[in-house]
Amino acid sequence: MLERLAVDVAVVAGLGIGSYKLKALDAKGALAAAAVGLVVLELGGFYPFLAMVTFVVLGVLATKYRFREKAKLGLAQSRNGVRGWGNVLGNGLAAVIFLAFEYFSHMDVFWAATFASIATVNGDTLASELGKIFGKNPRLITTFEPARPGVNGAISWPGELFALLGSFIMALFALPLTEQKIIMLLAVTIGGFIGVNLDSLIGATLENEGITNNNSTNFLASLFGGFIGALLFYVLT
């Protein structure tokens, strides 16, 4: 038990330091990521942890992709793409909550919730960072009026495709944990995809009104995405 914990601590510490060295996270963000990673490992084990690591890697790659072009257009992530502890919690806290329920209940429905929440933040990051480049004619999700790329609530067809792809990738990590593989794949992918669009909706409404910020918007969207994934899994089974 202690040996496994020591290994887990070493792994998440190494990843945290690596994220800091690669300028994906600042110091507080790296500490928060290590803490979240350790909790995910202890509660959920290898597959949700690997999903979170994949999300971080894909997020960094998507953020850095054509970064100078995004910066010139005023669309780049602030602080040169370096994220802090608030972003880490906004993207990871919902998954931790669902994992805690799965840990004590051993119910597959909470696996669906966990991975749908991760699918939401992964799909949202890909849709946001790559949609700014490839989505040339975005529209506001609330009115479908033309919108400037990068505006809260702006969506585009390429962005929606990246959201679906990002959700699907995360769903694959959930398959070894259940016998209901097709249902899990559908529930997590659809839950994540809907969660991404809820993120846009919250951004266009609550965030634009100053009620939420980017981090709390991400948390709410991932929480709702997780609930939807769980509901779909429950209904389909």
Image (spheres, helix red, strand yellow):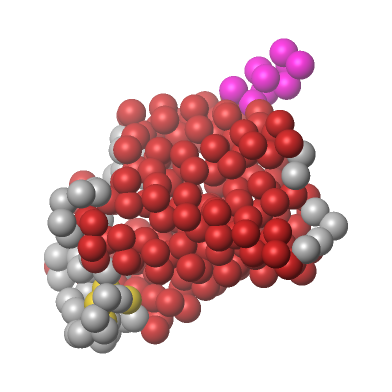
Give whichever of 189, 107 is nearer the camera. Answer: 107
Instruction: Kindly identify the residue that appears in the image at 59 percent across and 42 percent down.
Output: 98
Tell me residue 223's x, y (percent): 47, 50
Residue 112 visible somewhere in the drawing: yes
Q: Please tell me whether residue 70 belongs to the stretch shown in magenta.
A: no
Q: Locate the C terminus by quadrant.
A: bottom right
Residue farthest toward the right in the current orientation of the protein? 179
Q: Locate the N terminus by quadrant.
A: top right
> On the picture, is 143 further left or further right than 234?
left
Instruction: Kindly identify the residue that appears in the image at 32 percent across and 38 percent down.
Output: 86
> On the picture, is 50 further left or further right than 22?
right
Tell me residue 203's x, y (percent): 27, 61
Instruction: Kindly identify the residue that appears in the image at 15 percent across and 56 percent down.
Output: 209
Tell me residue 99's x, y (percent): 62, 39
Q: Please tell me whether residue 8 belongs to the stretch shown in magenta.
A: yes
Residue 119 visible somewhere in the drawing: no
Magenta range is 1-9
Q: Is residue 53 above or below residue 166?
A: above
- Magenta stretch, main secondary structure class: helix
